[in-house]
Amino acid sequence: MTNLKKNAIFVGILLSNIFLIFFVRNALYPIHYAPQGLFFLELMGITIHIPFELLLLIETGNIVLLFLISKKLFPNKFSLIAPMIYAVSPWSIYLVSGESFYIYLSFLIQVYFYGLLLKSEKKFLGLVFITIAAIIGAYTSLFLLILLPSILCLIIFFRIYNFKYLKLSFVILSLSISPLLFLILSNQLSFKNILNKQIQIFSDPGLLNMVNDFQGAAKQENLGKLAKISENKYLFFSEFFLLKMTKQFTPSTYFTSQEKLLNFSFSPPIYLGFLIPFFFGLYKILKSASLQRILFLSSIIVIPSVLAKEAVDLNRLILFAPVVILLISYGFTELIKQKEKKVISMFLIISISLVIFQFLTTVFDIQSREKNRFIKYNMQNYEIGNQ
Amino acid sequence: MSKNIIFMKKKLITITLLIVITIIGGFLRFYKNTENPPSLNGDEISMGYDAYSILETGRDQYGKFMPITFKSVGDYKNPVPIYLMIPAIKLFGLNDFSVRFQNTLFATLMIPLFFLFLIKIFKDKSIALVGTLFLSISSWHILYSRIEYETSAYIFVLIGIWSFMKMLDGGRKWALLSAFFFILTMYTAPAPRLFVPIFVIIALIFNFRKFKNNWNKLIIFLITSVILVLPLVYATLYQGAGARLKMVIISNDIEFQRYILLKPLQSISEAPLLIFFWLKRYLNYLQPEFLFINGLDVTLPGTIGLGMLYLFELPWLVIGIAEFIRRKIPYKTIFIIWLLTGIIPDSITNNQQHLGRLLHIAPVIIMLVTLGAVRFFRWLQNLSNLYTKFTICLIYAVFIIICLTHAFLVLAVHFPRAKGESFDEGLKQVALYVLNHQDNYKEIIIDPRRGIEGPYLVSNPYLYILFYTKYDPHIYQTEPKVSSKDATYFFKFNKYTFRSIDWRTDTDKKGTLFIGSPWSFPKDGLKTGELLEKINMTNGYTAFYIVAPKN
């Protein structure tokens, strides 16, 4: 494939993404997520939201970054797969349409990972990207303030990179973040509010009620002591946390409408046909220790979703979407490489046919039912513009 | 000589361990199985009376001679569990124990059988013993062993698949055996009726090459299967046995109709949505809360109950899957097909996910956990640092104990409290009260609607009356009965009437005994002495009032 042809396809991917965003936005009522401001401004009591037009631009940036990352990870001829999957999947399309703040955070995380990839090639530009993404990330989101440096620490801990190359980045990062820490210390009340808004996992009264009910029932049967050992709030919370954590890695979260986009949609975050390359990619990764380590490392990005009130928060989990999509691309790449085998080519055909079939079904469904579905889920009829 | 002694010693230890594990498994399944679950449910009671009826008259409750499917309460039950119940009823009489006995016995027998299966596959005693232990303490298997739940079908599935595997490499007798057990399974439980054909077709496609030099065994397998399945096909097409499938098919799912399609399925153009809804359902079986937290549905919704596996088995399942992929295992494709097609029957029904309808895949799931556990133990064994080894052992042992204690409390304490109503708790006491006092009344009226807070459920109390009064099946089959065909439930035989109670008119019926939920009667409208007895459930709520109007 010539570069010109490839670039033309890429532009086509970008345009189709923009088209789909407007298609969804027009098909639905103008609903959007509760606006979220930038972290450092919220600390000072100033609220500035990211407008839709800027989000659209950032989304384009996300696809470009995914393309650049793919180019680094996969052979050149397969680098369009990941941006294509991302661009046509309803996940980010719905979130951009709903003006999700996490699209912007996803962009920063991708810049960060792209920086890490460049750094692995010993390019100085990588260090620049890592530092810039980490600083902007820290100032704009509490999650990124914790996550991005943690990833860096883990990279050093697992000896993926040598610390001496990252020393400079650490020094600049520490110096740049210190005013933010000062801001946090001087606005503790605002910080507490932000913390409560972001970390909702502890605010579930159902857990305590359950513990009381269970212990009460066991006490009536003279088994109260046993219940205190095995049915207390600490254990149940740990189990609950483990469950939430596991749910972030369940295929149905990503490939079905089990968790509903914008809390009502039947569109899956990623088309189900991609499940085959996803599993194949995962299967291949199981055979490579270094890839396993990288996958494990990137999995900490699911933490914001774990800390949400719902079992899975697709809005927050979009941060992890590039990892899933890259895994699918990896699987696809491997499937295409082995397409001479009959079974593999059969899987490829099933996968692609299913994606096309579901894409058409979803587009038709969005056009004909999503608006009514929204009304039904929300039990009331919203008029356009009167929300 | 000494080698022989060591070999014999090892064999003896293995056999002893297997016996111990089977005894533990048997104890966990038989111990107080008539008290917990708290009552025979509607299906059990119906099967029990049908078996009794067959024993006494050779006909079911509708007077049909030795039927292939039992009409029961209109859901056309499978024949094998009912016929298997007959010896127990003959031996122990018509009671709760005899109804559950054959099921519990088969479930216990599954334990040593699973050992044999694992040892044939892996040729490794430790894997076989660990797997057997997991099956023996599995809350999933224990729960359905204590209820009359067609567990014999899952033994037949295991033998059927084992014979099928042997057929691929062996001779004709395996083809015969495999076909026999597969079809027997289809006569035993509803889920395998769909599982068996799908499994067989896909497994044959993937193993077609193996028949190239020996088509005879394939022909024998197919001919035997077709001959044996014909009566069932006939019953399904012409005797109403297909009614159940129509009732439970996924297109009738409430979520699908209300929230996905926004109307009932009417045209083929809407089928793509149904397909994706089904695929979503299918993948839901991998949800961690279903697998580890509340898939067993033994506690109230939103609480931490029990799933298909214990939480401590989670890491082992993950390691087990990786181990299954990496390791050379005979009949690997068969196992994959078994697991993937095994989910299909339950996933295409409109009910919520039901672990009982997945019991036929239990051997594969437990095998995966076993592979993970054995891998984990071997890794632990090879750790050179004693301190690390001890710490990991201690932490994991504590974790296991906590999980098992929780499981014990859930099954012993929370389950009877949460699910008493689903098991029609209280109707046994009602029937026994009727048995002891019926001579004092000219008519007995029982309201079939029930529910703690309102009339949410409709039960079949007439079956409890038939069962616990040991009502003569000869008389029941031949005496006149009155029943309404419309939505209002009305059924009458002898002096028993089953209908809604309307106290405004019923209060005048002297000499009649009324039994209904507390809300069947006016809150403060009962006169002193009219309320003869309250029947409470394990959770303390009152299930029934027994009332006789006074002048």
Image: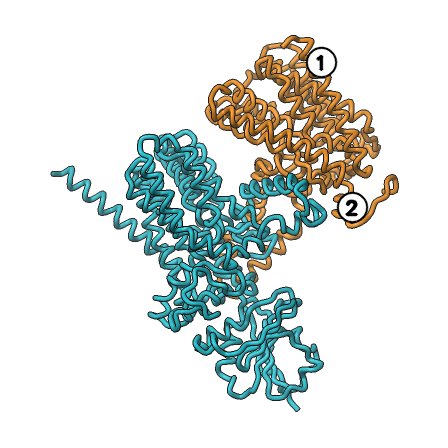
Chain colours: A orange, B cyan
- Horizontal arrangement in the rendering, residue A35 relative to residue B103 (left or right): right
Residue B379: % across, % down = 38, 33
Residues at marks 2 and 1, CA–CA distance in whole angstroms? 40 Å
Query: Quadrant of the rendered structure where residue A112 is?
Result: top right
Outermost residue on the right side: it is A386
> What residue is pinned by disc 1?
A8
Q: Secondary structure at mark 2?
A: helix
Residue B377: % across, % down = 37, 37
Can you see residue B467? Answer: yes
Which quadrant, please, contains the N terminus of chain B? top left
Q: Chain of mark 1?
A: A
Q: Which amino acid type corresponds to the residue marked 2 in the rendered image?
A: Ile
The reply to the same-chain question for discs 2 and 1 is: yes
Residue name at image x 72 percent, y 38 percent: A365
Outermost residue on the left side: it is B1
> What residue is pinned by disc 2?
A375
Q: Chain of mark 2?
A: A
Q: Which amino acid type corresponds to the residue marked 1 in the rendered image?
A: Ala
